[in-house]
Image: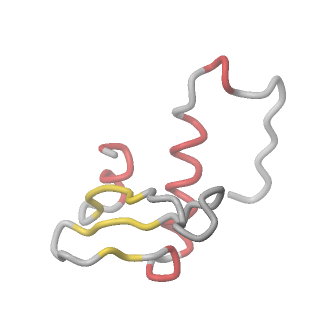
Amino acid sequence: MSNIRLAAPHFQDFDLTPDPISPEFTMLNWHDTKSKYTFGPHQISDGLLRIMALTTLFLLPKESLPSVLIIDEP
């Protein structure tokens, strides 16, 4: 989380609760430091969504990464 906070100081944490109707799906919800509400992915900028995705990818353990990784237009 601290890596994401470098780009978005207001970011507090993810809320990765599985969907009660379809438990195989999880919505990428998140919390802001200045609010008690839970926000959805539609309530954040595209740029910050990309930062979250790339940060998660680059911080995966080496053994979890594929042998080749291609990122097009991050």
- Considering the image in quadrants, where does the C terminus appear? bottom right
Give residue 17's quadrant in the image: bottom left
| Residue nearest the viewer, comparing 21 with 60 | 21
Q: Is residue 18 above or below residue 40?
A: above
Q: Residue furthest bottom?
A: 43
**Residue 65: x and y, percent?**
70, 27
Q: Is residue 51 left or right of residue 7?
A: right
Give residue 9's quadrant in the image: bottom left
**Residue 46: x and y, percent?**
56, 74
Give residue 21's quadrant in the image: bottom right
Q: Residue furthest top?
A: 63
Q: Residue furthest front?
A: 21
**Residue 37: x and y, percent?**
25, 78
What color scheme is it? Answer: secondary structure
Q: Is residue 72 left or right of residue 44?
A: right
**Residue 26: x and y, percent?**
56, 60
Residue in view at x 51 percent, y 64 percent = 28
Residue in view at x 63 percent, y 61 percent = 25
Q: Is residue 33 above or below residue 37?
A: above
Q: How many marks?
A: 0
Residue in view at x 24 percent, y 66 percent = 10
Residue in view at x 67 percent, y 25 percent = 64
Q: Is residue 36 above or below residue 6?
A: below
| Residue nearest the viewer, comparing 74 with 53 | 53
